[in-house]
């Protein structure tokens, strides 16, 4: 998810201060890690520099200046383009878990243990999400069910891969023997 475009989109309903944008971002999008204030203000500076947002007013007081921002017509165009552009499918086979299992196979470590530990971590997270889902509504419900679906797909991969470990190990041994024969 593009943090800068998401912050820009949060300006669409109306002008907002950086503090308000951070609160809204954290409320709707930062389920695991809140956005840092510094990132909000540096992003707003870039959005303003690029003509995607404008400063409407600056309020001076006892503390730092409060700057009110609004989205520009060009910014609305960027948000439209981002919202409607399909997200490219990612090759999950290139993920970290795949790499760990492959390294375990290649190094003689127990890949079944790698899969079992990951399965338990996934199940623990799924239980927490299922409890959270019961009280969730709106965008939070969408986020929780999205993560649950991905964890479920990962668990299917873990199960299928566990069933294939013997055959994959045999293929690796045969490939190594072929490499040894080729070397001479």
Image (cartoon, rainbow, N blue to C red):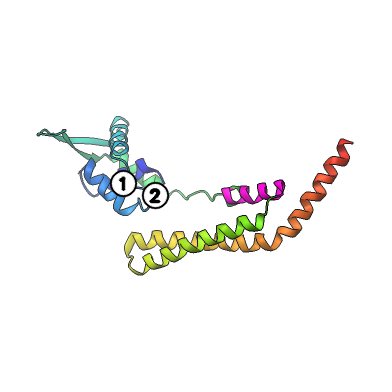
* Identity of the residue drawn at 35% across and 60% down: 140
Residue visible at 78% across and 52% down in the picture: 171
Mark 2, Cα crowd under 10 Å, few <14 / some 14-19 / many 20+, is: few
**Boundaries of the magenta span:** 95-108
Give the left or right position of residue 90, taking residue 172 as reference.
left
Q: Secondary structure at mark 1?
A: helix
Q: Main secondary structure of the magenta part?
A: helix
Towards the viewer: 52 or 176: 176
Where residue 3 sits, quadrant-wise, is top left
Residue occupying the point 36% across, 69% down: 134
Left/right placement of residue 179 relative to residue 151 reads right
- On the image, the x and y values in percent for residue 44 come to 28, 36
Residue at (35% x, 40% y) in the render: 4
Residue 96 among those drawn in magenta: yes
Q: Is residue 23 left or right of residue 150?
A: left
Q: Which mark is residue 9?
A: 1
Q: Quadrant of the C terminus?
A: top right
Pick whichever, 157 or 7, lies toward us.
157
Please tell me whether residue 18 is drawn above or below residue 171 in the rendered image. Answer: above
Residue 78 visible from this viewpoint:
no
Instruction: Say which element carries label 2.
Output: helix
Q: Position of residue 40 (x, y in %)?
A: 29, 39
Q: Are marks 1 and 2 in contact (CB under 8 Å)?
A: yes
In the image, taking residue 133 as reference, residue 89 lies left or right, namely right
Of residue 1 and residue 23, the one placed in the foreground of this image is 23
Sequence-wise first label, 1 or 2: 1
**128 vs 28: above or below:** below
**Residue named by callout 2:** 83
Percent across and percent down for residue 146 are 44, 60
Q: Residues within 10 Å of mark 1 (few under 14, many from 20)?
A: many
């Amino acid at each position: 998810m593009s943090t800068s475009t998401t912050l820009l989109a949060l300006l669409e309903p109306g002008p907002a201060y950086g503090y308000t944008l951070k609160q809204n971002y954290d409320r709707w999008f930062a389920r695991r890690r809140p956005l840092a204030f510094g990132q909000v203000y540096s992003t707003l500076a870039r959005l303003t520099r690029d003509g995607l947002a404008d400063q409407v007013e600056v309020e001076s007081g006892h503390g730092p200046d409060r700057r009110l921002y609004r989205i520009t017509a060009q910014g609305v165009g960027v948000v439209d383009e981002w919202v409607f552009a399909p997200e490219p499918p990612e090759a999950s086979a290139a993920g970290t878990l795949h790499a760990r299992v492959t390294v375990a196979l290649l190094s003689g470590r127990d890949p079944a243990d790698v899969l079992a530990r990951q399965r338990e971590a996934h199940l623990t997270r799924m239980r927490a999400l299922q409890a959270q889902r019961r009280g969730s509504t709106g965008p939070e419900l969408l986020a929780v069910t999205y993560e649950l679906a991905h964890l479920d797909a990962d668990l299917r991969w873990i199960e299928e891969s566990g069933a294939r470990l013997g055959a994959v190990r045999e293929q690796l041994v045969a490939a190594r023997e072929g490499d040894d024969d080729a070397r001479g």
